[in-house]
Image (spheres, rainbow, N blue to C red):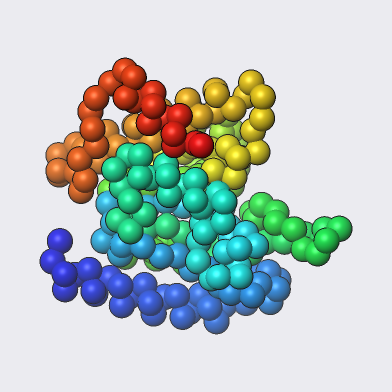
Amino acid sequence: MEESERERRRELLSRAAIAADECRKCAIGYERRNNVYGEGDPSSRLMVVGEGPGETEDELGRPFVGRAGQLLDRMLGAIGLPRVYVYICNTVKCRPTAPGLNGPRNRAPEPQEMENCRSFLDEQIEIVAPEVILALGAPAAKSFLGRDFQITKMRGRWYIGPRETPLMVTFHPAYILRQTGGEIEAVKRMVWDDLKAVRTKLDEPPPPLVTLSTSKGDEEEALQSSLFE
Ligand code: SF4
């Protein structure tokens, strides 16, 4: 893609981010420290959409920068797409919180909050025009596919998202980090399968940005396990 087109999109996103920063449609708009609009390559072939900013994101004004974000970085790197090549955002741009014992705690965005914020997300999708959208977690999946979406039963398949964009759903990195015991291996395997499906989709005609090793067997297993260390 021409650098001028990338710059044009960057400028459009910057303007949209200012509008999001001024938005107070929801109560959380008054409570958040920073609006977390999104970041990454404005011409990315892959857009990652999570549910909403957490505490660290709220503090820094950037999406996916806490522990879950570090895991996301490793997940993306494992499919040959370092974070800088991806556009990353959330369904809501302000941190949803609930009262907690030690101050506000993170919570999933409410349907009304996702609806209020949807125009910002749609605008991002329109500007970036990704070839694939990867939704992380049930709230993000529901924002695209409806409230009846059940992530445990319905993840790992291709859906049609906005702008007819192929849409894949997988577990949120925060969910992976919460797993313990026997569940963890099964969850890792499912996420790895979903990531590989995204890579395969991106490898269809236009050529990949970064070539992922196609080796199988031991090497792939090593990659899968190191991804979640
Ligand atoms: S979550 Fe979105 S719609 Fe709600 S106040 Fe924040 S920017 Fe506005």
Indicate the quadrant containing the N terminus: top left, top right, bottom left or bottom right.
bottom left
Above-or-below relation of 8 to 54: below
Horizontal relation, residue 171 to residue 161: left or right = right
Residue 29 seen from this side? no
Give the percent coordinates (x, y) of residue 3: 16, 69
Above-or-below relation of 135 to 23: above
Above-or-below relation of 79 to 55: above
Give the percent coordinates (x, y) of residue 143: 53, 49
Horizontal relation, residue 147 to residue 228: left or right = right
Residue 34 seen from this side? yes
Q: Which residue is depicted at the point 43% across and 49% down? A: 73
**Outermost right residue:** 101
Give the percent coordinates (x, y) of residue 111: 64, 54
Residue 30: image quadrant is: bottom right
Residue 222: image quadrant is: top left
- 154, 116: nearer the viewer: 154
Residue 76: image quadrant is: top left
Above-or-below relation of 198 to 68: above
- 176, 224: nearer the viewer: 224
